[in-house]
Image (cartoon, helix red, strand yellow):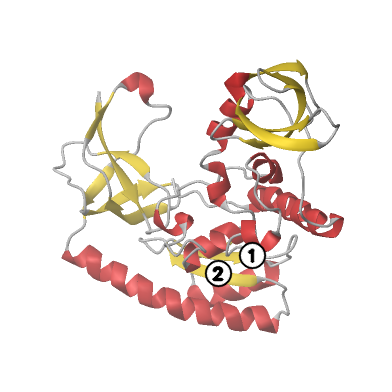
Amino acid sequence: MAKVVGVKFRKPGKIYFFSIGNLDVRSGDNVIVETNLGQEYGTVTTSVRNLSDNKIERKLKKIIRIANKDDRKHQEENLKNEKRAYDICLKKIKEHKLKMNLVEVRYVFDNSKLLFYFTADGRIDFRELVKDLAGIFRTRIELRQIGVRDEIKRMGGNGICGRELCCCSFLSNFDTVSIKMAKEQNLSLNAAKITGNCGRLMCCLRYEQNVYEDKMKKLPNIGAIVSTQDCGEGVVEGIEVLNEILKVKLKDEDDNFYYKKYNASEVKVIKEGKQEYKTDVSEEELKELEEMEKMDELDKKNTNDEEI
């Protein structure tokens, strides 16, 4: 068994677990830990947990110490120096005429490394920029390309729901979000309604997706021919997935069409329909959403933001 706690290095960031050894560590404490980047200053965000050895996938790094007065002072100096480094880097980017957007600058706590996070369309040749920065700051320089989701995560903001963005408050990982999810949830494919501040499909499309997928396994597709107990055969024209209600198109004795709603359990499927999704946007707008999806995958390949 190992005693572990979760540690964050910045507010909108991932939680990493470290062994506490013999230290008396509590949630809210600032600690110094060893990471792949070097020594880092973080905040304990969980209570102490006992973790069995078979649940530990890799060897846990230990917390070096609880941060003292000197550590806190040094961290404050690093934060001030990061602002200066940000301004200098912006100036150098303009001098080299590089098409990149600087997002954040971070000093590793022990000053062994200075990290510059940026976004860009495609790859950037920043070798000359690195040489200039290394000459100014006299430490190891790393430039890391991140995606626009990570950019907004660092900037912060509020969503259309009025609450703080999920990525800035509790999301530590970005799961795959697809247009198919919006279609299955009967959402409008209007980009303005299903994209977030980052210009990508909203992360919250993922939250209820498992529920929709489970329910859709029990429901017929639109276009399916079904038998009803009171009105004979009809065609499924619409589905309320969460309520498991079907909108069925029926024909009366005078061959006039009308619609009636049934619980899915009240009808019997005679012939299944093809899975089709109705869209309320033009082909051009749909292509725009598909392009967003492709860019999202590209961002994930370019992102490299692991502390430990």
Mark 1 packing: few (<14 Cα in 10 Å), some, or many (20+)? many
Residue at (58, 34) in percent of width and height? 212
Give the image location of residue 198, x and y in percent: 60, 63
Mark count: 2
Give the image location of residue 279, x and y in percent: 77, 49
Residue 206 relative to residue 45: left or right:
right
Give the image location of residue 141, x and y in percent: 54, 64
Most extreme residue toward the left is 24
Name which quarter of the figure residue 78 lies in.
bottom left
Say which quadrant the C terminus sits in: top left
**Foreground pick, 60 / 110:** 60
Say which quadrant the N terminus sits in: top left
Q: Upstream in the sequence, badge 2 or badge 1? A: 2
Residue 66 relative to residue 108: left or right:
left
Q: Disc 1 marks which amino acid? A: Thr
CB contact under 8 Å: marks 2 and 1: yes
Residue 190 relative to residue 46: left or right:
right
Residue 142 is at least partly visible in this image: no
Looking at the image, is 74 positioned above or below residue 211?
below
Residue at (31, 55) in percent of width and height? 42
> Element type at marker 2?
strand
Residue at (66, 20) in percent of width and height? 230
Residue 205 is at least partly visible in this image: yes
Looking at the image, is 1 positioned above or below residue 237?
above
Q: Disc 2 marks which amino acid? A: Val
Disc 2 and disc 1: Cα gap in Å?
A: 7 Å
Q: Which residue is mark 2?
A: 103
Give the image location of residue 112, x and y in percent: 43, 61
Q: Which residue is mark 1?
A: 119
Looking at the image, is 237 positioned above or below residue 296?
above
